[in-house]
Image: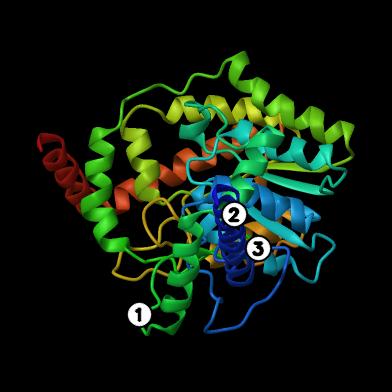
Amino acid sequence: MAARFLKLTAFFVLVTLLAVLALNVIMDPFGVSPVKFTMGGINEPKFFRSNLDRLLKPYDVLSQQPTTLIFGSSRVKQAFNPEHLARSPFAPAYNAGFDWATLSEGTQLLEQQIHVGAAPRYMFVEIVVNTFFRPGKPQLPTTLSEHAQNFASMFLSMSAVVASGATLAKNHSSAQTGQYLLPNGLVANVKHETEKDFLIDFPMRWAATPRDRYIVNDRLLEQLEAYRRLCTENDIALAFFIAPYHAVYLYLEHERGRWADIENFKRVLAGYGSVYDFTGFDRFSTEPIAGHMQYWTDVNHFSIEVGDHILDVLAGQRSADLPPEFGLRLTPSNIEVHLKNLRDARDRWITENRAFLENIEAARSKAAKL
């Protein structure tokens, strides 16, 4: 009797696991199933591909094996559309942007691709100044057991069952809102919260951030050297870039006393070869603040339109109507002129926007007192 009961129990457990596996493989709420069954209104879009960058993107990269890997922060994640490179030698491309990405996570992702014999031919790497000087530890899975455990959780866990059911329900709902990752790594359904973020939320965040200096040292530069070594050894064309910031953000960095630190950092980067600087005071960064902006979704994140222009420059397809300093390739021979041009443009913008900046300063002072 006991033996029969154990057999029945084992049978029902096996049937349940197989049913769970079949449901999650077919519904594929996280977009990683080897069975590529997609049907609009059933399991597409995949709304649960959200806030799971470090879990999902390593598998995406392994399965897609892109020609071009674009690594960076949430600024890359929200604005770099790999489809923009679709009819170029850089295709297929993949957006490997992570929220609060560290440079060491990018080298980890690249090492993973090299290890399986699927190294990209091109790699574009964003250098985010504030996170570069506050590097965190890599959070990507590294061991085979970690990868296996994460992959199994996306097919055999109850949370995956819930996600499968919710994917079906949400695809039948008329309120299909919320951000999610597309198969190419770009985020869909990005909310535009420009005016509120510029005038209320950002001053509060800024008032709460530490007033650290940006001091370059050998330990930090080793992160850049790691990329250069890996790419040189594996015949990968590497380009670093500093993505644009809105003029308000640049102004507050200046007011905090960090402008000279940033200039010194760019002087160091100028000796690295392929480093492109997209910061400045041009038509993109000086766009007037409004409820819905063409070039910005909030104070830190630029739009896909701006991301397309950056990709054009990095891919050697620069359009003639771009501002001359936008995406300048830094070299020891042009860096001082470039930095002076940015200082002059900054001072002109401050002079022309005194009344607006007084409102920003008032909001920042009010936030600091809360």
Above or below residue 97? Residue 208 is above
Q: Secondary structure at mark 3?
A: loop
Q: Earlier in the sequence, mark 3 or mark 2?
A: 2
Residue drawn at 49 percent across, 26 percent down? 133
- The answer to whether residue 100 is seen in the rendering is yes
Q: Residues within 10 Å of mark 3 (few under 14, many from 20)?
A: many
Q: Position of residue 267 (x, y in %)?
A: 61, 27
Q: Secondary structure at mark 1?
A: loop
Residue drawn at 55 percent across, 52 percent down? 1
Q: Quadrant of residue 216?
A: top right
Residue drawn at 59 percent across, 45 percent down? 150
- Tell us which disc is closer to us: 2 or 1: 2
Q: Which mark is residue 184?
A: 3
Provide the residue designation for mark 2. 4
Residue drawn at 80 percent across, 27 percent down? 229
- Contact between labelled residues 1 and 2, with CB atoms less than 8 Å apart: no
Left or right, residue 287 beside residue 42: left
Provide the residue designation for mark 1. 175
Q: Residues within 10 Å of mark 2 (few under 14, many from 20)?
A: few
